[in-house]
Image (cartoon, grey):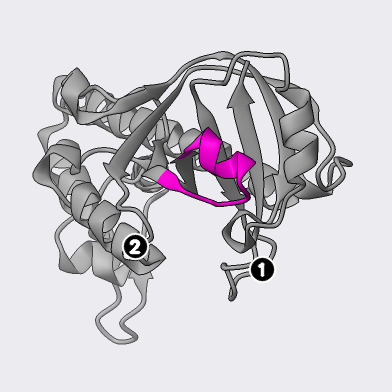
């Protein structure tokens, strides 16, 4: 209340000169209550002071409409953060959902949007990381949001030889980007044949893979999606191999 008086927002109806006690008339209670509920909307005291001293509802309404707009944006941001958290919870628990190493299973995937960079044969992972980080930092992607799951497009013939040969390294956009189509790539929706393995360790059953595709056409798209099982060591992480069929 002293601060309200100091900034000229609300002065007591009477101050005892001997004791310094400040007295407020009951007619001022509604004034105090209005200050409090306007503060509860996130309005600053300077704005409240301007509104209250104007005595005009017409002066108040634009402030309320602007606050409503701000709060709706905040609500949207909170919902998006909750969705992101749900995505990460699923990411860190995905490999515990019952699939066995090197056993095939099928999943249906929606269209996915990625930022990718080409890979050079036998280059260190660090170089791919640097190149992708440089791509993400371009001004065109300033307003883009990414999900932290890394993946590769993989050469299928090399996999049949037991060799992990990535042709592209990528990361997901959180949603379809509002960018020129040249600035992102699409992973098509469809049915994918999958198995889990330590891809960077080149640890998968070649015979199982060869036998499955023995009398089938070679797939045009093979992905390796990283799933971290710890927060320190990534080279031995499990990957889900996704083969578009």
Question: Disc 2 on helix, strand or loop?
Answer: loop
What residue is disc 1 on?
230
What residue is disc 2 on?
123
Q: Which of marks 2 and 1 is in front?
A: 2
Residue 190 coordinates in the image, percent (x, y): 59, 12
The answer to which quarter of the image holds residue 86 is top right
The region drawn magenta spans 154-166
Residue 180 coordinates in the image, percent (x, y): 16, 21
The answer to if 156 sits in the magenta stretch is: yes
Establish if 186 lies above or below 125: above
The answer to if 188 sits in the magenta stretch is: no
- Residue extending farthest bottom: 18
Q: Look at the image and tell me whether residue 17 can be seen.
A: yes
Residue at 70%, 57% in the rendered image = 203
Residue at 44%, 46% in the rendered image = 166
Question: Disc 1 on helix, strand or loop?
Answer: loop
Q: Nearer the viewer, residue 69 or 232?
A: 232
Answer left or right for 55 relative to 108. left
């Amino acid at each position: 209340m002293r601060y309200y008086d100091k900034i000229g927002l609300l002065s007591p109806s009477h101050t005892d000169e001997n004791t310094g006690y400040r007295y407020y008339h009951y007619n001022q209670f509604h004034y105090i209550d209005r200050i409090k509920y306007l503060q509860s909307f996130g309005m600053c005291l300077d704005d409240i002071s301007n509104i209250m001293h104007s005595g005009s509802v017409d002066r108040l309404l634009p402030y309320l409409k602007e606050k409503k707009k701000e709060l709706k944006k905040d609500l949207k941001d909170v919902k998006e953060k909750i969705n992101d958290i749900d995505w990460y919870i699923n990411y860190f628990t995905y490999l515990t959902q019952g699939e066995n190493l090197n056993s095939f299973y099928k999943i249906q995937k929606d269209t996915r949007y990625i930022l990718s960079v080409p890979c050079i044969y036998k280059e260190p992972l660090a170089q791919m990381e640097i190149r992708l980080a440089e791509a993400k930092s371009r001004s065109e992607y300033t307003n883009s949001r990414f999900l932290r799951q890394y993946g590769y497009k993989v050469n299928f013939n090399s996999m049949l030889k037991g060799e992990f040969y990535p042709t592209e390294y990528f990361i997901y956009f959180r949603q379809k980007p509002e960018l020129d189509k040249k600035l992102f790539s699409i992973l098509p929706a469809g049915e994918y044949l999958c198995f889990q393995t330590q891809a960077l360790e080149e640890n998968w059953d070649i015979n199982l893979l060869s036998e499955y595709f023995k009398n089938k056409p070679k797939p045009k798209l093979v992905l390796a999606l990283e799933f971290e099982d710890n927060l320190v060591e990534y080279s031995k992480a499990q990957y889900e191999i996704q083969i578009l069929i």
